[in-house]
Image: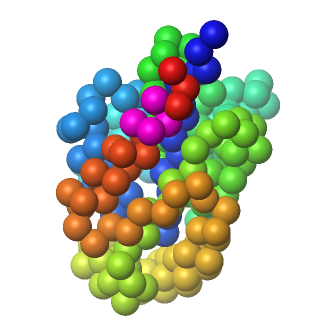
Amino acid sequence: MAKPAPLIVVSGPSGAGKGTVVKRLLEMRPDVFVSVSATTRPARSGERHGTDYLFVSTQRFLAMRDRGEFLEWAEVYGNLYGTPRAPIETALSQGRTALAELDIQGAQATKRAKPDAVLVFIEPPSLEDLVLRLRGRGTEDAESLSRRVKASYEEVKAKGVYDHIVVNSVVETAAGELLRILEEQEKARR
């Protein structure tokens, strides 16, 4: 009997370009199921419910958590985030590779819940690049930016627990490396 399809968990520090790399991967492999996280934070400009996040009230989030509906959940910068379990389980049972873009603690919690999950750490070419990317976004006030930079330094230290590390200096190259990892996992499970 074939093993279930792989769950690939992508994470890394804020500003590493995870979302951009994942977006490019999905252009190459639109068949990959991407998990949409639930959050209690308000939507940012241009974000859509059900596509970028499932934007829910704190009360609804806590009810989902209490019913065991999350594969993992955490509080990050004062907001709650969680990965709904059912859509991932459904995709995997249908033989579809699933991908979840999570923060460091979410990746580690997912690995505990699903030991066969494959963790991929996306990092910038240098911490200086990371700081420049965060500043270049223009989405953070000075205090928030400082908090994210400090957290990013700590997150980079956690990369040793990951199965793979991908340096994102060129998005196309990083997405190609992520695709190679994904396809290796699919082949190993056939």
> Residue 74, can we see it?
no
Identify the coloring. rainbow
Q: Nearer the viewer, residue 136 or 42?
A: 136
Q: Against 93, is 164 above or below?
A: below
Q: In the rendered image, which quarter is residue 174 located in?
A: bottom left
Left or right, 91 with respect to 125, comes to right
Q: Which residues are magenta?
A: 183-187
Residue 87 painted magenta: no
Position of residue 31 measured from the top left corner of the image (x, y, whole percent)? 31, 24
Residue 186 painted magenta: yes
Q: Nearer the viewer, residue 38 or 114?
A: 114
Q: Against 24, is 124 above or below?
A: below
> Residue 28, can we see it?
yes
Q: Residue at x 64, y 69 (%)?
A: 160
For the N terminus, the image quarter is: top right
Q: In the rendered image, which quarter is residue 32 located in?
A: top left
Q: Nearer the viewer, residue 3 or 45?
A: 3
Position of residue 136 measured from the top left corner of the image (x, y, whole percent)? 25, 78
Q: Residue at x 69, y 27 (%)?
A: 69
Q: Residue at x 43, y 81 (%)?
A: 145
Q: Against 149, is 175 above or below?
A: above
Left or right, 182 with respect to 46, comes to right
Q: Nearer the viewer, residue 30 or 132?
A: 30
Position of residue 37 measured from the top left corner of the image (x, y, whole percent)? 51, 39
Exactly how many numbered labels are in the figure? 0
Q: Against 126, is 48 above or below?
A: above
User: What type of secondary structure mainly makes up the magenta span?
Assistant: helix
Q: Residue at x 62, y 51 (%)?
A: 107
Left or right, 24 with respect to 35, comes to left
